[in-house]
Image: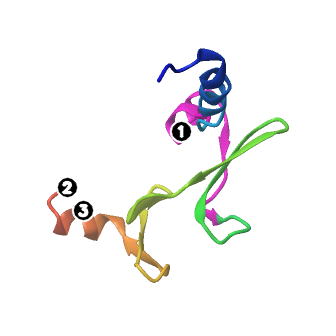
Amino acid sequence: MKLELPFFGPLIALAIFSLPVVAHAENFQGLSGQGYKVAALSNNKAGVKGWTLSKGPVRYFCELRASLAYSGKNGMVSFTSAGRVMTLDRAAFEKKNGWS
């Protein structure tokens, strides 16, 4: 059985063009280093917690992927698995964990 290239050419082209395209995205650290202003921790329209970074008309939403985060200079917040936010005393937390 001889396989003809004209038959497999369209199949190969279809396979190549149906591969997913990878998009490159910036991260929080990269955007804040480029001078983007960081808004307070909030929820987006889908209810996901994170920060909105903006520079002129350009806005990005960076999703929070942590269980602890610093809030201001003296506060911390902890996120439960149920999505609740607990405020913590940063000095007490760091002292208890030996971070200070």
Q: Is residue 86 left or right of residue 51?
A: left
Which quadrant does the C terminus fall into? bottom left
Q: Nearer the viewer, residue 2 or 69?
A: 2
Q: Of helix, strand and loop, which one carries label 1?
A: loop
Q: Is residue 77 left or right of residue 96?
A: right
Identity of the amino acid at label 1?
Answer: Asn
Going from the N terminus, do you reach mark 1 or mark 2 first? 1
Q: Nearer the viewer, residue 62 or 34?
A: 62
Does 34 appear in magenta?
yes
- Crowding at mark 2 (Cα within 10 Å: few <14, some 14-19, many 20+): few
Say which mark, if any, is on residue 99: 2
The residue at which mark 1 appears reads as 27
Q: Residue at x 64, y 37 (%)?
A: 18
Q: Nearer the viewer, residue 82 or 51?
A: 82
List the residue tagged with mark 3. 94
Q: Is residue 39 above or below residue 49?
A: above
Residue extent of the magenta highlight = 21-42
Report whether 72 appears left or right of 57.
left
User: Is residue 37 a member of the stretch shown in magenta?
Assistant: yes
Residues under numbered marks 2 and 3 in contact, where contact means CB atoms less than 8 Å apart: yes
Look at the numbered disc 2 and give the secondary structure of its residue. loop
Q: Which image quarter: residue 58? A: top right
Residue 47's disc is none
**How far across and down, in percent of the image, does residue 40 sit?**
63, 58
Q: Nearer the viewer, residue 82 or 52?
A: 82
Between marks 1 and 3 in the image, the one whose residue lies nearer the viewer: 1
Where in the figure is residue 44, as x and y percent of width and height?
69, 64
Q: Is residue 37 above or below residue 3?
A: below
SS for tag 3? helix
Q: Residues within 10 Å of mark 3 (few under 14, many from 20)?
A: few
